[in-house]
Every structure is written in C-alpha cells, then in structure tokens.
C-alpha cells in the first residue's frame, strides 16, 4: 500500500510567525527540524499501520524544508520545485490515501495561524466549482482526480475544522490552538510527535476497514475563480487562454479536469512582471 504525506509548514506546532517559515530568517532552522520531526511521526504512524510505500511532498515555499539527513528511511522525499504537481507531487492512481501535515486554514479565517490560500500577499480567496477552498481543498481535489481520499490533517484547530467541514470526517491532530493570526497555544513536540503518529496510524486503519473519508472529486469541467488582493495580479492572470475578468480583483477560467485546473491556477498566481 502506498500513501502520500503532503507537508506544509505554517501548521507545524510552535509556528506563529512568518519568519519561522522563512529560510532567510535565523529562526527557520529550528522549525524545519520540528517540521521534519512531525513528518517523521506521520511516516512512523503509517508504517505502524502496515503501509509499505510512503512518499512525501515537501509543499512549503520552494519545497526544500524537510531535512533529508533526519528523514525516516522508510519514506521517499519529493523535494524542490517547480515540480509537476507541486504540493501533491508523488500522487498517482496507486496511492491509497493522503495525509496532510503542517497545514493551515484558508485565507481570511479568524483564529487561524498564518491563514492564507497559496499566497498571503497576492490571493484573497479561491473557489473551485463555486466551493470556497483553501490549500487543503485545492490539494484534496487533486487527490480526488486520482480517486484518492485525504485521511488526516494536522495543524491548528481552525484548519482541522475547515478540512473536516469540506472533506468529511477525517482524522485530525490539533497541534496548536490559534488565538489570533499571529498567536497560538502550542503543544510540545514531545506531545505532537506521538499525537501525529497515533492519528496517522488510526487514519489508515479506518481506510482499511472502510470507514475512512471519501475522495473529494470535482465534477468536470472544473471552474476556478480567483480573487486577488491587487488588480495588477488579475491584469496578468487574465492573459491565461480562456480566462475571464469578473471584476477588478476576480478572474475565472474553466478547465477540462482538476489537473489542468490546478496547473492553470498555479500559472495564474505565479509572480512575474513580464
Ligand atoms: Zn506553507
């Protein structure tokens, strides 16, 4: 059995500031180690449940956060970017389930640490087939394209609640309780590591006994609507073939399937001044 661990950084325990997720800041080195520990916990939990193929997608920033020298030997790491499937690199039809680790709530959420959707500086909101999604929703829809369900999520309480609301009753590991955008009550890694390990294991046992969540499948064709923060970003995104301007800040486009929609979304939000 193969599973994909899709990793992000803002939802790792202890993280409450952008600096802690920023490679140019000195604090970052601490939190990439904690991120690696929480990822290893999910690897261990999956292995405990009998999973024999574990693939990781390092999905934060340029995808070079997880420390390979500390990586559990039972996992393989998709590192770097821009990879073909970005935060979901490594997924395919043979994958049985996805675990989201270190995830964060969608842009505009209250009591949610560093809540954003893809780019805090450029995007306010994203809808897929008129459903408001965060990164958890977008990435779950990519998994759904391959018929693969998301089995668990870790992050703050708001992130976990949003994922359950959209994707169904998956297993959750709340590693911190957000009290604002930049503040949270955080658990020690001595607690989050066993919590994530147990939760990952339980999520796979639920998959095996048929009580896990269903894949999040977007009906084709897939409509993507993006609301940017600045009209300038919409000016450029609307140059995508077939894209339509809805307002100063919003564009939409229709794609034949979720994979093309995901690629189109990534192209639309890419930062460039050409
Ligand atoms: Zn991130």
Image (cartoon, helix red, strand yellow):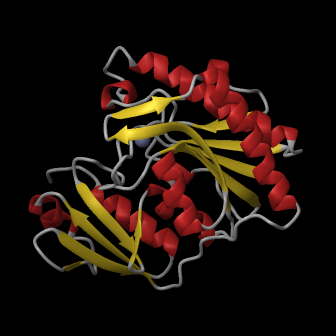
Q: Nearer the viewer, residue 108 or 269?
A: 108
Side of 79 relative to 246 (left or right): right
Q: Quadrant of the C terminus?
A: bottom left
Can residue 2 be seen here? The reply is no
Tell which of 161 and 257 is nearer to you. 161
Q: Position of residue 235 (x, y in %)?
A: 12, 66
Task: Please give the name of the residue rendered at 42% of the width and 80% of the height, measured from the top-left corner.
Answer: 129
Q: Using the rendered view, name the quadrant where residue 117 is placed.
A: bottom left
- Residue 173 lies, in percent from the top left, at 63, 43
Residue 254 picture quarter: bottom left
- Tell me: residue 171, above or below residue 248: above
- Residue 158 x/y as whole percent: 46, 51
Q: Quadrant of residue 43?
A: top right
Q: Where is residue 91 in the image (x, y as percent from the top left)?
A: 64, 56
Instruction: Tell which of 143 and 192 is nearer to you.
Output: 192
User: Which residue shows up at 35% across the image and 27% down it?
Assistant: 22
Q: Residue at x 31, y 35 (%)?
A: 182
The residue located at (67%, 59%) in the rendering is 170
């Amino acid at each position: 059995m193969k599973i994909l661990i899709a990793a992000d950084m803002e939802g790792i325990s202890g993280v409450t500031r952008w600096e802690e997720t920023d490679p140019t800041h000195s604090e970052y080195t601490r939190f990439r180690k904690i991120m690696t520990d929480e990822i290893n916990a999910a690897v261990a939990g999956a292995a405990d449940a009998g999973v024999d193929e574990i693939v990781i997608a390092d999905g934060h920033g340029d995808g070079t956060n997880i420390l390979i020298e500390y990586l559990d030997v039972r996992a393989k790491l998709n590192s770097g970017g821009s990879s073909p499937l970005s935060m979901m690199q490594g997924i395919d039809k043979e994958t049985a389930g996805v675990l989201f680790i270190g995830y964060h709530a969608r842009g505009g959420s209250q009591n949610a640490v560093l809540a954003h959707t893809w780019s805090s500086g450029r995007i306010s909101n994203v809808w897929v087939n008129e459903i408001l999604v965060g990164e958890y929703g977008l990435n779950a829809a990519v998994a759904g394209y391959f018929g693969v369900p998301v089995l668990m999520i870790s992050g703050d309480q708001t992130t976990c609640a949003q994922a359950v609301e959209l994707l169904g009753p998956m297993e959750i590991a709340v590693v911190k309780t957000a009290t604002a955008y930049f503040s949270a009550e955080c658990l020690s890694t001595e607690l989050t590591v066993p919590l994530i390990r147990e939760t990952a294991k339980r999520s796979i046992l639920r998959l095996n006994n048929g009580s896990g969540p269903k894949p999040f499948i977007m009906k084709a064709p897939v409509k993507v609507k993006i609301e940017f923060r600045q009209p300038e970003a919409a000016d450029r995104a609307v140059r995508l073939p077939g894209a339509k301007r809805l307002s100063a800040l919003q564009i939409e486009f229709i794609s034949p399937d979720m994979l093309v929609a995901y690629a189109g979304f990534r192209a639309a939000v890419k930062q460039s001044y050409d």
